[in-house]
Image: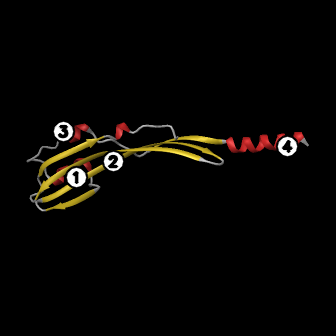
Amino acid sequence: MKKRCLLLVVLVAAAMLSGCAVFGVTKDFKPFDQQLITQVTPGKTTAQEVTKLFGAPNQVVKLSNGNAYIYTRSLNKSTGLWLVVVTFIDMDTQHDRIVFFLNNNDIVTNYGRSLNAADAAYGLPF
């Protein structure tokens, strides 16, 4: 009888401690090409040239004196530990973002960028 109880305890403990660990990363992330960004010249580059270089913007914001074209890309890295009873997950998402400000004549007046996607990191899920 003691052997059966011990076996049952061992099986329950093994089931509770079994699980898997997972590391994940966004597979479709593509960073902005720095060469393309340097081709944009405020006061000269047009909206058509911006869309030719970067494609369609993720978002267009109507401003009182023109538009803002917003391009965003994000990188997500995650770590997970699945046990039968409990799950631990850590996710870190960082973004690359470029905003082009265009006047009413569709000429770039200014732009800003924040390139932080490379800072995404795996972490302990605790």
N-term mark: 1 or 2 = 1
Instruction: Name which quarter of the figure residue 106 lies in.
Output: bottom left
Residue 2 occupies quadrant: top right
| CA distance separating discs 3 and 4 | 71 Å
Q: Of discs 3 and 2, which sits in the foreground?
A: 2
Left or right placement of residue 120 versus residue 99 in this view: right
Task: Place residue 60 in its image quadrant.
Answer: bottom left
Residue holding disc 4: 5
Q: Crowding at label 4, few (<14), some or many (≥20) Cα neighbours within 10 Å?
A: few
Compute the Cα span from label 1 to label 2: 16 Å
Whether the residues at callouts 3 and 2 have beta carbons within 8 Å, the answer is no
> Hey, what amino acid is under mark 4?
Cys
Closest to the camera, between mark 3 and mark 1, is 3
The residue sitting at 13% across, 47% down in the picture is 110
Q: Earlier in the sequence, mark 3 or mark 2?
A: 3
Q: Position of residue 27 (x, y in %)?
A: 44, 44
Please tell me whether mark 2 sits on a helix, a strand or a loop: strand
Residue linked to disc 3: 38
